[in-house]
Image: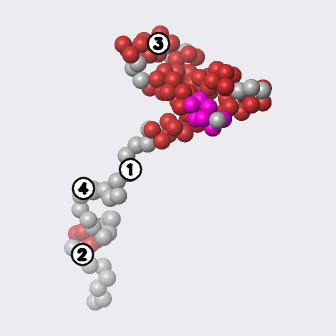
Amino acid sequence: MRFYWLTLGILGVWRITHLLSAEDGPWNMTVAIRRKAGSGFWGSLLDCFYCLSLWVAFPFAYLLGEALKERFLLWLAFSAGAILLDKLDSKGPDPPIYFEHGGDDHVMLRKDESSASGINLNTKT
């Protein structure tokens, strides 16, 4: 039964944190909140998923934990679980296996001036 509450807590923390930090929300409500927060402390808090997940996890841990030690550990676990879910959710595309480049495919990167002008300095006379 405790695993059930841990899972619900992590999902709840991720959902609220993601809503506040990365989504427009219903009727652009969270966009308006982020704009009002500006670029000060509150604005930077809403921009950082890691920081915001700690603050969102706190009430979850307080409500679902029983003892002080359990609440503290749940607080960290909920935040960490939300961060892991966010990393899984925001995984970008795989890097390309190959790349193409323009230009000539020369073995030598540079040529010395004598070979470029047609003079061969290595001949014996």
Q: Which residue is mark 2?
A: 119
Label 1 with label 2: CB-CB less than 8 Å: no
Q: Earlier in the sequence, mark 2 or mark 3?
A: 3
Label 2 with label 4: CB-CB less than 8 Å: no
Residue 12 is drawn in which quadrant?
Answer: top right
**In the rendered image, the vertical position of residue 42 relative to residue 105, given as above or below:** above
The residues bearing labels 2 and 3 have C-alpha atoms spaced at a distance of: 73 Å
**Percent coordinates x, y for residue 78 in the rendering:** 62, 32
The residues bearing labels 4 and 3 have C-alpha atoms spaced at a distance of: 47 Å
The residues bearing labels 2 and 4 have C-alpha atoms spaced at a distance of: 30 Å
User: Neighbour class for label 1 at 10 Å: few (<14), some, many (≥20)?
Assistant: few
Residue 92 in sight? yes
**Percent coordinates x, y for residue 120 in the rendering:** 26, 78
Q: Earlier in the sequence, mark 1 or mark 4?
A: 1
Q: Earlier in the sequence, mark 3 or mark 1?
A: 3
Instruction: Identify the element where label 4 is drawn.
Output: loop
Label 2 with label 3: CB-CB less than 8 Å: no
Q: Which residues are magenta?
A: 2-10
Q: Which residue is mark 3?
A: 33
Task: Point out the image quarter for the N terminus.
Answer: top right
Instruction: Identify the element where label 2 is drawn.
Output: loop
- Looking at numbered disc 2 in the image, what kind of residue is underneath it? Ile
Q: Between tags 1 and 4, which lies in front? A: 1
Q: Which residue is mark 1?
A: 94
Magenta span: chief secondary structure: helix
Residue 106 is drawn in which quadrant?
Answer: bottom left
